[in-house]
Amino acid sequence: MFMIEYRDIGWWYWLVTVGLLTAGILGWPMGFQLAIGLTVFQLIHFALREGKITAFPIQVRIGYLLLLLIALPKPMQLIYWIPMIGTWAQVIFGYCTMARMVSLLPWNRREPFSVNFLKKTFLSRPVRGSILQGFAAAAPPH
């Protein structure tokens, strides 16, 4: 049930980020800006590590960064609840909603878009590594 990945640098990035988002929601607005800065830093780190901007972990971090930036203006800051709750789910249970959403993009999927595909995407158990790897492992052999 719990998927605490304390040996993974990505997990630590998410843990600090969600701490900053939580601090922002609790009344320290600088937390939002620091979360954005840390997300940019981790995006650069993973881009260098992966070697290509199209890598799935990079796509997830770009989507996450865009969500944080959309929520930055004061009237939009209620939106920060979404990545905060989602990131806590990622840190504690390994369930990454953003990765599941990014997996739906046409270049990341091999299955046609359908209600069953959506159910499989959002209701499947968390997996270690990428959700795309989990789908590949669950796919029937050709």
Image (cartoon, helix red, strand yellow):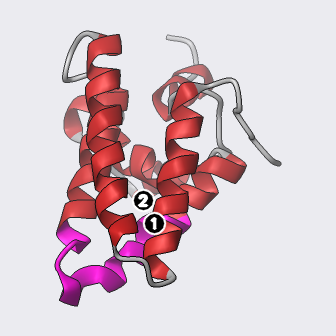
User: What secondary structure is found at the residue carrying circle 1?
Assistant: helix
Q: Are marks 2 and 1 in contact (CB under 8 Å)?
A: no
User: Viewer-nearest of labels 2 and 1?
Assistant: 1
Q: Is residue 41 above or below residue 76?
A: above
Residue 141 position by quadrant: top right
Observer-nearest of 52 and 77: 77
The verdict on residue 73 being magenta is: yes
Q: On the image, numbered disc 1 is attached to which residue?
A: 21
Observer-nearest of 118 and 44: 44
Q: Main secondary structure of the magenta part?
A: helix
Q: Is residue 137 above or below residue 127?
A: above
Which residue occupies the extreme right position in the image?
1
Badge 2 density bin: few <14, some 14–19, many ≥20, Cα 10 Å: few
Q: CA distance from mark 2 to mark 1?
A: 32 Å
Q: On the image, numbered disc 2 is attached to which residue?
A: 115
Identify the magenta region: 70-85
Q: Residue at coordinates 29% horizontally, 54% vertically from top-left? A: 36
Q: What label does residue 112 carry, if any?
A: none
Which residue occupies the extreme bottom position in the image?
75
Q: Is residue 103 left or right of residue 89?
A: left
Q: Please state the horizontal and vertical placement of residue 62, each as a whole percent of the image.
A: 24, 42
Q: Please state the horizontal and vertical placement of residue 76, each as a whole percent of the image.
A: 23, 83
Q: Please state the horizontal and vertical placement of residue 83, each as a whole percent of the image.
A: 43, 64
Q: Residue at coordinates 22% horizontally, 72% vertically from top-left? A: 72
Q: Is residue 120 left or right of residue 59?
A: right
Q: Earlier in the sequence, mark 2 or mark 1?
A: 1
Q: Amino acid at mark 1?
A: Leu
Q: Residue at coordinates 21% horizontally, 23% vertically from top-left? A: 54
